[in-house]
Amino acid sequence: KSLFFMFVVAQALRLHPKKIVARMASLSSSSNVIVDGTTLPLQSFITNGALYERCVDGPLDMKKWESYGKVIVQEILNKDAGESLSQSEAIRVYQYYLPVFFWAASLLQSHRQGAAGSSNAAPLVIGMSCPQGGGKTTLVDALNLLFTKDGDTCADMSLDDFYLTHAEQVSVAEDSKYAGNSLLELRGNPGTHDTTLALETLAALNTENNVKVPRYDKSAFAGRGDRRPEADWTTFSKRPDVVLFEGWCLGFSPLGSQDSFAADPRIAPIDALLAGPYKDLHEAMAAWIVVEVESPQSVYTWREQAEESMRNAGKPAMTPEQVADFVDRYMPAYAHYLKGLYALGPEGSTGKPVLSFQIDHGRNPVSEANAKTFAA
């Protein structure tokens, strides 16, 4: 009878039944969040989020959400628990990072159930695609913290960490077959990563202990970057439960047809590589998170913000003019590949779980109803 009553109420109010359950439960919840100095019911704030219905299945465990939210507030936002959050901060914690984590955690649970009885189960590998500056590194940091709080071991990897060494990148730029191709003069585009090392690292994480994951120093060589010495790589002492692998061009599908990039032949070698070693990387993912943008033009602002932070910290960094030149080299790939990624999903994702959503210029998710049409 109670379920029938909730369904009738949901129909009457034109609300999703999951939201009805949450709102009825919130009547007895005393958890609150302070947003811009105003105290709000935490449960209602959570369930009104853009990702809630797509990421959360079943009743909310408010104690867990509140506890995990405090971890993000303290470790990511560097604020005290109970301190007032800005609207953007509150959205990021309770309507972005936490829903995505609970979506990923449910995948891990299913992954374990599928491997029940196996003493040699491989980790769950989740690929994450998001343009530069879109906040993917911070999202990975948040997910890593929460998986750790759940008692799971999480290995984080960035495609950026597999950039060629500075010397190798200079060799690519000077290679006669890429002569005049500005897209391969600097790190960034497919063709400037050590895909063999990336695949070997993923394979090692699947089967071995004490695996070293490379790290990259973007401030080296006046912002041109270089791989860090092996002594600075991160070592995972035991096989992880989850691997989070993020990258700006992960999931890009090759166009194949020469006509597709006739207007910009610089894309041709990049497209060929996407059909080769990068495709192998994509196939290694068991699930995907795709963080979409309305327009890649936001990358100019986001990249400059990152470089400005490095300059303010006294680290070598690119000038605003160098940032513009650097980002210019990514724009052709965005123009050719993002539309397909958003419409068809990542390369190699057929039959796999994919969570796709758009973020605004402030890097917070927007609802599907409010998402804007992609404009290259």
Image: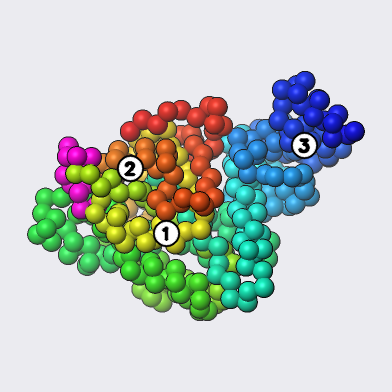
**What amino acid type should be assigned to the residue bearing mark 1?**
Glu
Q: Nearer the viewer, residue 110 or 241?
A: 110
Query: What residue is shown at x 68% (from left), y 61% (from top)?
Result: 150
Q: At label 2, which amino acid type do we have?
A: Tyr
Answer with mark 2 or mark 1, whichever residue precedes in sequence.
Answer: 1
In magenta, the rendered stretch is 259-270
| Proximity of marks 2 and 1: CB atoms separated by less than 8 Å | no
- Colour convention: rainbow
Q: Residue 11, can we see it?
A: yes
Residues at marks 2 and 1, CA–CA distance in whole angstroms: 17 Å
Identified at 22% across, 44% down, the residue is: 257
Name the residue at 11% across, 50% down.
Answer: 180
Pointer 2 residue: 337
Residue in front for this viewpoint, 101 or 92: 101
Q: Residue furthest right?
A: 1
Question: If the image is split into quadrants, where does the C terminus sit?
Answer: top left
Where's residue 290, x and y in %?
Answer: 47, 45
Q: Position of residue 98 (x, y in %)?
A: 64, 47
Q: Where residue 351 is drawn, which disc sits there?
A: none
Q: Secondary structure at mark 2?
A: helix
Q: Amino acid at mark 3?
A: Ala
The residue at the far top in this view is: 12
Q: Quadrant of the N terminus?
A: top right
Q: Against 204, is 187 above or below?
A: above
Residue 199 in the image, given as x and y percentages of width and height: 39, 68
Q: Nearer the viewer, residue 254 or 178?
A: 254
Image mark count: 3
Q: Which residue is mark 1?
A: 283
Q: Is residue 136 left or right of residue 218?
A: right
